[in-house]
Amino acid sequence: MAADWLWRTPDFLPIDFIVVGGAISGLTAAIALSRVGHRVTVLEVMDSFDQTPMGAGCRIPPNASKLFYRWGMEERLRKCSVKSRGVLFAQYSSGSVVGSHEWEEDVLEETGGDFLLMHYSDLRRILAESAAEHGAVLRGGCQVVSVEPDSQRPYVTLATGEVITGDVIVGADGCHVPPYHCRRIILEALGQEDREKPTGMQLFNVILPDSALKELEDKELVDRLRQTGNVFTWFGPGYGALGFPVKEPTTGEPLFTLFVYAAYKEKDLFIGHAGREQLLQSLQGCDPRLLQLAQHAQDIICIPMIERPFLEDWVHPRGRIIAIGEAAHPIPAGSLYALGMAAGDAAVLGRLFSHLHRKDQIDSFLNAIPEIRAGRVERVLRAAAGNIFAVSLPPGVAEARDRALRERAERGIQELAARKGSLGGLGAETSEEMMQAIEKIFAYDPEDEADNWWVQWGLMQERAARMVVSDAVTVHVNEDLQEESD
């Protein structure tokens, strides 16, 4: 486990970071860098960090929450969130519960964090507060029109004409909403095509009032949804839904979130607000209780599920610009892992740059980040595919086009149903699946991984650099002595 106390080299060199994008990736990067002493400016197009116009429910996995706890946000997060204690699996068409599992406390202790359910607006506000407390400058209402690489001082130009320079630009402007400048210029520099591949699916992220639950006749289900913090998962072939409790950002009153995954027919889809009728049409043939809940929808955000390629390299070849989070590795909308992977990228960025004491280390540290993180992101997505304990998307949605993965997910659910009541509802096979999710995904510590890189490679590079300097000084002294003797 990474140490809770902060450490850095005695001759630490603070530099200027410009972070483009003030969502999860950008704010976690701002915290990770400013808390070790760097000067950070975050540029965000929205005016406010306190309110998020299209914010809805979100899930925070243990590998992200433990970082946030370590960085001083535990009390605020616990106050604004609901702790998830397990998952219920039900058939999409009938609502019949066919399996369930609960996370045991000793198992979660292995991860160092919690599964938290909360409103995205609250999460973003808390991250922004923490970044500002650590000294980061947060600038809202900044429309970036261009990002220019440079080997020494890359710069950003705003719509106002203002030019902002720094030592490093961190591209945290995502991939879902154009123009995502940082991702685009890296793609262009690499000669990599940004192929967008529609999946034929869309996500409705829905907020419901707590009164919607009171309308349900199934009081046992209401108790399960409201009191335990369970995530209710409806699954079917190629569609599904997730339901979980959250808290209202300003009052703390209970709300309920639905993630509804459904097919779409429209050719031109974009992220935006949707009408209730559009949501209800997408739910034809579903569990009547799910349809009843959807009739109370207040805020509905529609997000097309589009596959985009991971960057072949996260660092611009001509200047000090690095992409992190979804700008580097797009992950399906509504996935549990987008947030966790973004936080991990930021943690590695901050940890490596805590060792900075010469500017000629900057390029080495930037190139080390994708070296550490790119393979990790791919391994997580592979480990999660078909593993019901990884609870990313409803079974049948992520695996809709892969028969083997779909069958693996279905076997896991069948095991839960068959072994219910023994070993806490877990059979030997699914226990192994759960431990795989814990060990390979949720217990991982990105700051530990950054420390390992520093010990194995960073210090070796430092010793090599000192040897070169020492040799140069020796040569210079010998030349002086030779001149004096002459």
Image: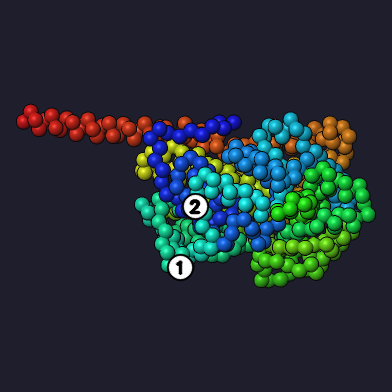
Across the whole image, how many numbered discs are drawn on residues?
Answer: 2
Residue 110 x %, y %? 68, 32
Residue marked by disc 2 = 137
Classed neighbour count for the residue bearing mark 2: other residues with Cα under 10 Å, few (<14), some (14–19), many (≥20):
some
Q: Amino acid at mark 2?
A: Val
The residue sitting at the right extreme is 217
Q: Is residue 34 left or right of residue 106?
A: left
Foreground residue among 272 and 33: 33
Numbered disc 2: secondary structure: strand
**Residue 35, how many percent across, how many down?**
51, 41
Sequence-first disc among 2 and 1: 2
Residue at figure coordinates x 71%, y 63% from the top left: 301
**Callout 1 amino acid:** Thr
The correct choice, above or below, for 297 with respect to 445 in the image is below
Tell me the residue that label 1 is attached to: 160
Is residue 137 shown to the viewer in this render? yes
For the residue pair 96 and 294, the one nearer the viewer reads as 294
Colour scheme of this structure image? rainbow
**Residue 394 in sight from this viewpoint:** no
